Image: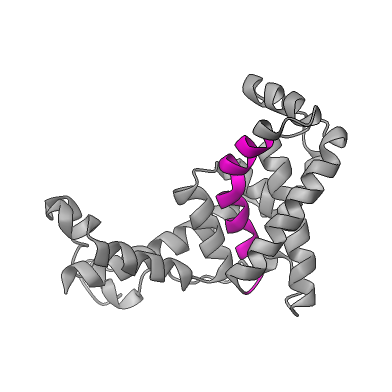
C-alpha cells in the first residue's frame, strides 16, 4: 500500500526531535540518520538492482532525495518507512534501466513452492502420510562454536546472497536489520501474505543450507 494511502501514524518523540534538527541543517543529526538507516537502505536497494555497487549509488541518490524532501514529509508514516520508500522508488527506476522492469511484488512467486523438499516427508501410502521421515536435528544440543564459527557464518552469508532477490531482501530486513513486517510491506509494496511467504521460504532455504553444513 502506498504511503500516501496509509492512516497517519504519529512519529516517535525522538524522531520528531531528529526531524526538527534535520530541517535546521544540523549535520550531526544527518550523521545519526546515516548511521541508523544506511545498512537497511542498502538492503532494500539490493533487492532491485544487480550489484552491490549499484545499490550503493541508489542509496546515495536516496540521501539527496531525503534531504530535498524533508520539508514535505508529513508524518503519514514513520521517518524510517518514508526513507525506505524513497530508496525503493529510486532502486526500481534504476532497475528498469538495468532491464529489470518488474516491480518487487512480482518477484514473489504465486505458485506453491515447497519450502522443504517433499522427499523428506512420508508418502500417501505410508502409515503416517505427511509426517517427517526423520525430524530435523535439534541444534540446541550442538556446541556453540559449531553454530557461531567463522565457517558457519560465512556459509550463511553466501546462502543469503544466493537467495532469490525478493526472499533475500525480506529476510535481510526482518532478521538482520530488525524491521517489522509492516515496515517491510510498506517499503517494498508487498502484501502481508507475500511478506510472510517470502520470509518463510528464505528462512527455510537458509536453514537447509545450515542443516547440511552442520550434519556433514
What predominant SS class does the magenta segment belong to?
helix
Residue at the location (12% across, 54% down)? 143
Going by the image, does 159 lie left or right of 150?
A: right
The verdict on residue 25 being magenta is: no
Q: Quadrant of residue 166?
A: bottom right
Answer with the quarter of the image where residue 142 lies: bottom left
Residue 160: x and y, percent?
A: 44, 66
Q: Which residue is situated farthest in the front direction here?
A: 27
Lateral position of residue 117 relative to residue 39, left or right = left
Q: Residue at x 65, y 32 (%)?
A: 28
| Residue 162 appears in the rendering | yes
Residue 181 drawn at (x, y percent)? 56, 44
Which image quadrant: the C terminus?
A: bottom left
Task: Give residue 157's position: percent from left, percent from top.
Answer: 39, 65
Residue stretch in magenta: 30-50
* Residue at image coords 81%, 49%: 65
Quadrant in which residue 111 is drawn: bottom right
Asked if residue 24 is positioned above or below residue 36 in the image, the reply reads above
Amino acid at each position: 500500500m502506498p504511503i500516501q494511502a496509509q492512516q497517519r501514524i504519529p512519529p516517535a518523540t525522538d524522531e520528531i526531535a531528529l526531524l526538527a534538527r534535520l530541517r535546521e541543517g544540523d549535520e550531526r543529526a544527518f550523521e545519526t540518520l546515516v548511521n541508523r538507516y544506511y545498512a537497511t537502505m542498502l538492503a532494500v536497494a539490493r533487492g532491485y538492482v544487480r550489484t552491490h555497487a549499484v545499490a550503493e549509488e541508489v542509496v546515495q541518490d536516496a540521501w539527496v532525495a531525503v534531504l530535498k524532501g524533508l520539508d514535505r514529509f508529513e508524518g503519514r508514516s514513520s521517518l524510517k518507512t518514508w526513507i525506505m520508500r524513497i530508496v525503493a522508488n529510486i532502486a526500481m527506476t534504476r532497475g528498469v534501466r538495468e532491464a529489470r522492469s518488474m516491480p518487487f511484488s512480482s518477484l514473489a512467486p504465486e505458485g506453491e513452492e515447497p519450502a522443504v523438499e517433499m522427499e523428506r516427508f512420508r508418502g500417501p501410502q505410508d502409515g503416517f502420510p505427511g509426517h517427517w521421515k526423520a525430524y530435523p536435528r535439534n541444534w540446541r544440543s550442538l556446541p556453540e562454536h559449531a553454530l557461531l564459527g567463522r565457517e558457519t557464518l560465512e556459509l550463511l552469508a553466501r546462502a543469503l546472497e544466493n537467495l532469490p532477490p525478493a526472499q533475500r531482501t525480506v529476510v535481510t530486513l526482518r532478521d538482520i536489520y530488525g524491521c517489522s513486517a509492516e515496515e517491510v510491506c510498506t517499503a517494498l509494496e508487498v502484501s502481508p501474505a507475500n511478506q510472510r511467504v517470502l520470509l518463510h521460504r528464505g528462512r527455510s532455504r537458509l536453514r537447509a543450507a545450515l542443516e547440511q553444513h552442520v550434519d556433514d
